[in-house]
């Protein structure tokens, strides 16, 4: 099960202060938070899980 609250946090801001160019959330940086939340809510469970996996992989490479 995907922790959707983590996705909301990632949509709000990158924990590393700058998103990588291949971050799926990079294209949404200028949107209002409510629009980011709506986008996340519209994703399938699989889509949400893919975002979490992308973040986990990114985190491993940035530590």
Image (cartoon, rainbow, N blue to C red):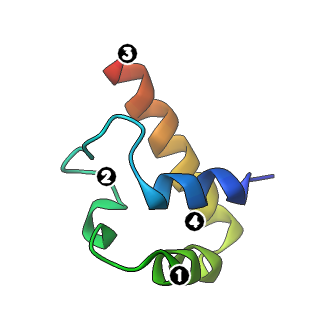
* Residue 9, numbered label: none
Mark 4 closeness class: few <14, some 14–19, many ≥20 residues within 10 Å:
few
Q: Which residue is mark 1?
A: 34
Mark 4–mark 1 Cα distance, whole angstroms, equals 19 Å
Q: Earlier in the sequence, mark 4 or mark 3?
A: 4
Q: Earlier in the sequence, mark 1 or mark 2?
A: 2
Residue 7 is situated, as x and y percent measured from the top left of the image, at: 59, 56
Q: Which residue is mark 2?
A: 23
Picture quadrant where residue 46 is located: bottom right
Mark 1–mark 3 Cα distance, whole angstroms, equals 30 Å
Mark 2 closeness class: few <14, some 14–19, many ≥20 residues within 10 Å:
some
Q: Quadrant of the C terminus?
A: top left
Mark 4–mark 3 Cα distance, whole angstroms, equals 25 Å
**Of marks 3 and 2, the one in the foreground:** 3
Q: Earlier in the sequence, mark 1 or mark 3?
A: 1
Residue 43 is situated, as x and y percent measured from the top left of the image, at: 59, 76
Q: Earlier in the sequence, mark 4 or mark 1?
A: 1
Q: Residue at x 53, y 81 (%)?
A: 34
Seen in the picture, residue 22 relative to 30 is either above or below; the reply is above
20 relative position to 45: left or right: left
Q: Which residue is mark 4?
A: 47
**Of marks 4 and 2, the one in the foreground:** 2
Element under label 3? loop
Residue 51 is situated, as x and y percent measured from the top left of the image, at: 51, 54
**Of marks 1 and 2, the one in the foreground:** 1
Element under label 1? helix
**Of marks 4 and 1, the one in the foreground:** 1
Q: Residue at x 57, y 65 (%)?
A: 47
Mark 3–mark 2 Cα distance, whole angstroms, equals 16 Å
Q: Which residue is mark 3?
A: 63
Mark 1 closeness class: few <14, some 14–19, many ≥20 residues within 10 Å:
few
Contact (CB < 8 A) between labels 4 and 1? no
């Amino acid at each position: 099960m995907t922790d959707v609250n983590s996705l909301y946090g990632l949509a709000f801001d990158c924990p590393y202060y700058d998103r990588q160019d291949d971050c799926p959330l990079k294209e949404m940086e200028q949107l209002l938070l409510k629009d980011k939340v709506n986008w996340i809510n519209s994703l399938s469970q699989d889509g949400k899980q893919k975002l979490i996996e992308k973040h986990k992989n990114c985190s491993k490479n940035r530590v």
